[in-house]
Amino acid sequence: MEKLTPDQVGGLLRPGMKVAVLGGCNEPRGIAAALHAQPEATAGVEFTVTRIPGIASPTLAPWAGSTVRSFFVTPEMRAGFEAGSVRFVPMQYRYVWDDLMAAPFDLAIAQFTPPDGNGDCSLGIGAGFLPALLERPEIPFVAEWNGSLPRLPGAPTVRADRFDYVVETDVAPPTLASRSGPVAERIGALVAEFIRDGDCIETGVGAIPGAVLAALHGHRDLGFHSGLLSDGVMDLVEAGAVTGARKTIDRGRLVAAMVLGSPALYDWASRSDLIDLRTVDYTHDVRVIAKLENFVALNSAVEVDLFGQVNSEMVRGRQISGTGGAVDFMRGARMSAGGRSIVALEATAGGGRFSRIVPALPTAHAATALRTDADIFVTEHGVAKVRGLDVVERARRLARIAAPEFREELEVQPAQLRR
């Protein structure tokens, strides 16, 4: 094991190398910042990254001759994506794991806690994709040992001697805040009506998921199995709403791929013995989710069309995010006994200028989820339950939850579906 400074990591890179920089909560922020300042070191290198919109550190591209292969397009990657140096790969979260297990890499870089007295380094606040590469001994590893990374009791660990190179840093972990306004709170209250005591829930990032969690404080014995554990989940545990007592697998456990939120959440998670951080080949696998009876998948969207197709990643023909894990959870919920797949979104965008319920997805927009993936749609104007309905009635119900100023145009569309 060789110790390096962050600035020395660039010396390991050579043109033509394929380097994995993982990712999400475990992105090596100290090393990434150093590489960001050394474009000459990254020239000719292809980086594969697992970044999360909203928390990513400085991007590793676009410098001349460098490329980034990514499963999301984050705002700081926009210029590189438009220039062609960022290559976006649409892929469901579960299958990103398989991709990383098979892809050829010359080097991997990721963040860990420093070793404890037993020589074990923790993955900190996220398991995610990282073990996919740790399980491949042929790949040399650069570990950023971050002294400020929380060490969760339920996080996986790895022996310190797995690493070929070590960089010691002290960088605050990423934080993510969720602010809900009146519209999100109205949507949250409507969604909460479809969640019963004892259900197992999944939520994502954003104002609406946060509002849903805030509306569940009166529930009891909820379970939790998700990609992300946030402040809202912590609050539900403290309120006695989430216990996991009725989960059909992992009973009593909070299962997530990562913990992401405020410093208070990290402090709580570091002391909690309820959290199991699991890799995405477990958290996002439909076969696992299907074993959780009464599983409720809650996801948001950019727009939904009258077929029930969901776009969660494009705006005005531009890629703004990625496929992510929504479809994994939607399909797992449909396979779960008593499960429900809910898509919640505000009815308008652009200050009310655009309807998020549209006749059909524009030709420039990809469908993140198929019309068969979700069965309940919610806006601030109401609920459309579409499971088991014919295409015309589905469209009618979706039109009714659009903003009133757009309904007349939408309500003439269902008859055309008979053609």
Image: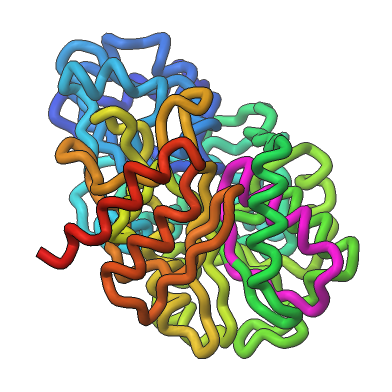
Examine the rendering and report whether any part of residue 96 can be seen.
no
> Residue at 32% of width from left, 21% of height from top?
78
Coloration mode: rainbow
Query: Which residue ends up furthest to the left in the rendered image?
Result: 419
Query: 356 or 256, which lies in front?
Result: 356
- How many circles with numbers are drawn on the protein? 0
> Residue at 86% of width from left, 68% of height from top?
218
Q: Which residues are magenta?
A: 202-225
Determine if the magenta segment contains residue 308. no
Is 241 situated above or below 104? below
Residue 118 location in percent, x, y? 70, 60
Examine the rendering and report whether any part of residue 89 can be seen.
yes
* Residue 13 appears left or right of 298: left
Is 291 situated above or below 152? below
Is 22 situated above or below 154? above
Query: 59 or 135, which lies in front?
Result: 59
Determine if the magenta segment contains residue 205. yes
* Residue 70 appears left or right of 175: left
Is 70 situated above or below 118? above
Q: Determine which quarter of the picture holds residue 326.
A: bottom left
Residue 211 location in percent, x, y? 70, 49
Residue 349 location in percent, x, y? 47, 31
Q: Determine which quarter of the picture holds residue 198.
A: bottom right
Residue 293 location in percent, x, y? 57, 87
> Residue at 9% of width from left, 64% of height from top?
419
> Residue at 31% of width from left, 70% of height from top?
372
Query: 201 or 21, which lies in front?
Result: 201
* Residue 294 appears left or right of 322: right
